[in-house]
Image: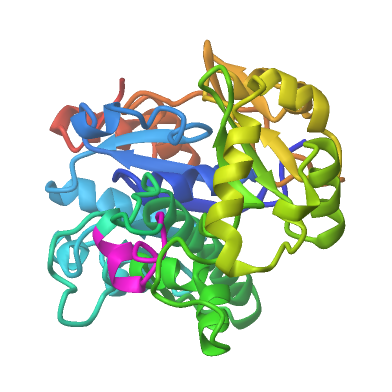
């Protein structure tokens, strides 16, 4: 099985965070993704990125060398897309901006991954995930009542609002290019991507159903029936009994008295209901609650750590996690009934595929030898 994106080729100018996540998503679905690293790689990328770098070919190349830039432009001639994560204007100064690349291949899709976007007052400012989701309204909405906003790792900006949106944009533009014969620039901003993830909550706000009072709503820890609770052994369970029939089953299985829990949607009583439910949940261990509620319509799950999650029976049955070169990691997703997904290849070292990539692109052995001898490219 080769994956639904088999036949598409993308060039990834090496970065960290959202760019590699975009590359992983494209490569997991069968696209050929050529990651262009600096010789020796990026020392920052060595920390925590090995899984994000899977399924790529790796070309080590000096982007400050005229021969290196020419190599990139020549690769663009046969590629479907290229994406980068530099600040606005950097790629142009290097000589690999949209105009330079599309001059070689008018059908090329050019992806740009930034926090603030290519334009606007903040376009040239530095930032990180937390800053971008601050500007979209996403960070303010997360957390408990009376507490400061809770930082959701870097899932909402870098990955959900950044790399995932860029991957979606690259595939959309590549499909359009097949019809029009013309490439275009995909401007992916983490501010706007994380704002898109908040669409439902902006909709609820327009109806007066979601306010800036953090931790007081149904889905943000305000409701007693949509909450994480500590168990007798110091572990945690998640309960999401929103619908009345699911809430009724929660009350039945946890033996919650009707006088305390009878009116599910009485928001004035939610704090007291939450306190009483917390005391009930604290009476049993996580495993005891799991034995009682898992698989029912309570909408229940034990809160698992990264060590535990791959071994949960449901995840094992679906092979939701795989082990590659001794590293446990999430399997490619989503799944496809016919085209499947390619076999996972672990992260390649910088320059591991330099000769193979250049040869596939039509460079002669003599050309490659000259590039290596001149230091424009490196073969690991």
Q: Residue drawn 40% across and 71% down?
A: 213
> x and y percent of residue 114 in the render?
29, 63
Q: Quadrant of residue 163?
A: bottom left
Q: Residue at x 52, y 10 (%)?
A: 326
Q: Quadrant of the N terminus?
A: top right
State the image coordinates of residue 195 (x, y, percent, origin top left): 43, 72
The quadrant where residue 233 appears = top right
Q: Quadrant of the C terminus?
A: top left
40 drawn magenta: no
Task: Examine the rendered structure and indicate whether residue 294 appears above or below residue 180.
Answer: above
| Left or right of 354 in this view: 272 | right
Camera sees residue 218: no
- The residue furthest front is 259
Counting every numbered tag in the picture gives 0
Boundaries of the magenta span = 131-144
Give the residue drawn at x 59%, y 68%. Answer: 267
Front in this rendered view, residue 341 or 213 = 213
- The percent position of residue 248, horizontal first and vertical second, equals 84, 52
Farthest-out residue, top: 326
Residue depicted at x 84% and y 35%: 295
- Rendered view: 27 above or below 77: above
- Residue 350 drawn at (x, y percent): 31, 28
Relative vertical location of residue 89 with respect to residue 20 in this rendering, above or below: below
In the displayed structure image, the side of residue 222 where residue 190 appears, left or right: left
Question: Magenta span has 142?
Answer: yes
């Amino acid at each position: 099985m080769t994956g639904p994106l088999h036949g598409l080729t993308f060039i990834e100018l090496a970065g960290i965070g959202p760019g590699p996540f975009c590359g992983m998503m494209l490569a997991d679905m069968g696209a050929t993704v050529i990651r262009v690293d600096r010789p020796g790689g990026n020392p920052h990328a060595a920390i925590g990125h090995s899984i994000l770098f899977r399924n790529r070919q790796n070309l080590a190349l000096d982007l400050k060398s005229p021969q290196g830039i020419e190599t990139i432009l020549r690769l663009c001639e046969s590629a479907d897309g290229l994406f980068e994560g530099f600040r606005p204007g950097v790629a142009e100064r290097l000589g690999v901006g949209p105009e330079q690349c599309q001059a070689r291949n008018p059908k090329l899709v050019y992806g740009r991954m930034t926090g603030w976007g290519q334009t606007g007052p903040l376009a040239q400012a530095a930032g990180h995930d937390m800053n971008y989701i601050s500007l979209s309204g996403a960070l303010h909405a997360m957390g408990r009542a009376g507490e400061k906003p809770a930082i959701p790792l870097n899932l909402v900006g870098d990955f959900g609002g950044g790399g995932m949106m860029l991957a979606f944009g690259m595939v959309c533009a590549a499909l359009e290019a097949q019809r029009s014969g013309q490439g275009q620039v995909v401007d992916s901003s983490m501010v706007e991507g994380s704002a898109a993830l908040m669409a439902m909550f902006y909709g609820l706000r327009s109806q007066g159903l979601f306010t800036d009072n953090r931790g007081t709503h149904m889905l943000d820890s305000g409701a007693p029936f949509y909450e994480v609770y500590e168990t007798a052994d110091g572990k945690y369970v998640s309960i999401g009994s929103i619908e009345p029939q699911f809430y009724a089953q929660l009350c039945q299985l946890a033996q919650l008295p009707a006088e305390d829990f009878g009116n599910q949607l009485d928001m004035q009583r939610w704090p007291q209901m939450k306190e009483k439910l917390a005391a009930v949940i604290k009476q049993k261990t996580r495993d005891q609650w799991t034995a009682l509620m898992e698989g029912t319509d309570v909408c229940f799950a034990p809160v698992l750590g990264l060590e535990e999650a791959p071994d949960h029976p449901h995840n094992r049955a679906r092979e939701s996690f795989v082990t590659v070169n001794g590293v446990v990691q999430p399997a490619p997703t989503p799944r496809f009934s016919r085209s499947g997904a390619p076999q996972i290849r672990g992260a390649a070292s910088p320059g591991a595929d330099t000769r193979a990539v250049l040869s596939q692109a039509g460079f002669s052995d003599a050309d490659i030898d000259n590039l290596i001898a001149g230091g424009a490219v490196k073969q690991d």
